[in-house]
Amino acid sequence: ETGVTQSPTHLIKTRGQQVTLRCSSQSGHNTVSWYQQALGQGPQFIFQYYREEENGRGNFPPRFSGLQFPNYSSELNVNALELDDSALYLCASSLVVGAIAEAFFGQGTRLTVV
Amino acid sequence: GQQVMQIPQYQHVQEGEDFTTYCNSSTTLSNIQWYKQRPGGHPVFLIQLVKSGEVKKQKRLTFQFGEAKKNSSLHITATQTTDVGTYFCAIVEGSQGNLIFGKGTKLSVKP
């Protein structure tokens, strides 16, 4: 058990709709990252938040946006959903100790866009 | 940006056989991590390698970082059914550790 929790676990949305996914990071971790994992692929980095500021972004359009709150929980918002947005969305909090940056993943939200 | 290529994509073994997955990069890597994702699960951190030629062992798992820091491998000795899952290598980028994953090697083990 990683201590990172995501909600909801499953979600079905219609093309064009908007969705908000939530993540509670592990206690003491001030960095949260979001990843998109399509079926049969490795997770792809969407963006990262550190102390409530976006700290890096992958190759995703602006309709993917996020927030981090003072308690370090986070949201991922996706506007104007497309069929290709169907994927497992993973949240990870990380702890950097010396040279080791270990990511702790939540169980993910499975999003289906129809 | 940096990329890592993982081979093979799939590996089917009989229980008790060994298994190896390889991760390759065209550029020198500062570090590499390995994760395991069980079917229906989420990635779980296994290890991070940072030194040239580094070899680390965890029970039946042996992790290696190449001398040129452009490749890495994960070897499992005498696979068990509990080893089933997809094994990913990942590069840590940025000061706060965002990850660039390979496509993974899916391991199935026949009892």
Image (tube, rainbow, N blue to C red):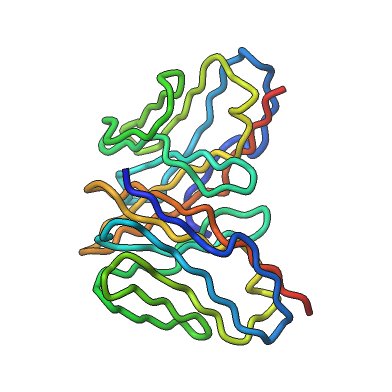
Quadrant (top left/top right/bottom left/bottom right) for the C terminus of chain A: top right
Q: From what the image shows, is residue A6 above or below residue A114?
A: below
Q: Nearer the viewer, residue B102 or A66?
A: B102
Say which quarter of the image contains residue A113: top right
In the image, taking residue B50 as reference, residue A63 lies left or right, namely right
Q: From what the image shows, is residue B74 above or below residue B96?
A: below
Q: Outermost residue toward the right?
A: B111
Q: Nearer the viewer, residue B38 or B86?
A: B86
Q: From what the image shows, is residue A79 above or below residue B111?
A: above
Q: Nearer the viewer, residue A31 or B43?
A: B43
Q: From what the image shows, is residue A70 above or below residue B12?
A: above
Q: Residue at x 61, y 12 (%)?
A: A16
Count of numbered circles on the image: 0
In the image, taking residue A94 as reference, residue A64 lies left or right, namely right
Residue A68 placed where, x, y %?
Answer: 35, 31
Say which quarter of the image contains residue A66: top left
Residue B5 placed where, x, y %?
Answer: 45, 56
Q: Residue at x 79, y 79 (%)?
A: B111
Q: Residue at x 45, y 24 (%)?
A: A64
In the image, taking residue B5 as reference, residue B105 lies left or right, namely right
Residue A24 placed where, x, y %?
Answer: 45, 41
Q: Nearer the viewer, residue A55 or B53?
A: B53
Residue B1 placed where, x, y %?
Answer: 31, 42
